[in-house]
Amino acid sequence: MRMLATITKPTEGKITWRGVDIATRPDPLRDVLGYLPQDFGVYPNLSAVEFLEYMAPSGTASENRPPAYR
């Protein structure tokens, strides 16, 4: 999963998304993929939902989304 989320590079082979090698050009996939690991370490006392609520005001959440998804 970490390779698909472009956090780590494949040690063998190649992963492509829409014909693009994500190891060399990860940004197109990162623009549409959200990944929150089970153990995200920095804020160990927050649930995944609490972490997303904490990070949402950073400006990455769209105002056009319903409140449950902001």
Image (spheres, grey):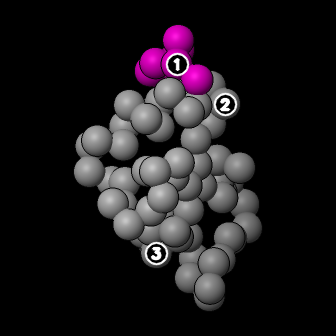
Q: Give whichever of 39, 68 is nearer the camera.
A: 68
Q: Earlier in the sequence, mark 3 or mark 1?
A: 3
Amino acid type, callout 1: Leu
Which span of residues is magenta-colored?
Answer: 41-47
Which mark identifies residue 38? Answer: 2
| Residue 57 higher or lower than 38, as above or below | below
Most distant residue in the front direction: 67
Judged from the image, the secondary structure of the residue bearing numbered disc 1 is loop
Residues marked 3 and 1 touching at CB (< 8 Å)? no
Q: Whole-percent x and y of residue 37? A: 62, 36
Query: Label 1: which residue?
Result: 46
| Mark 3 or mark 2, earlier in chain | 3
Residue at 73%, 67% in the rendered image: 13
Where residue 16 sits, quadrant-wise, is bottom right
Q: Residue 28: give its label.
A: 3
Report helix, strand or loop for mark 2. loop
As for residue 24 lying within the magenta part, the answer is no
The quarter of the displayed image where residue 49 is located: top right
Q: Would you call the spot at circle 2 few (<14 residues within 10 Å), some (14-19), or many (20 or more)?
A: few
Q: How far apart are marks 3 and 2 (CA)?
A: 24 Å
Identify the secondary structure beneath mark 3: helix
Q: Earlier in the sequence, mark 2 or mark 1?
A: 2
- The reply to whether residue 7 is in sight is no
The Cα–Cα distance between marks 3 and 1, rounded to whole angstroms, is 29 Å
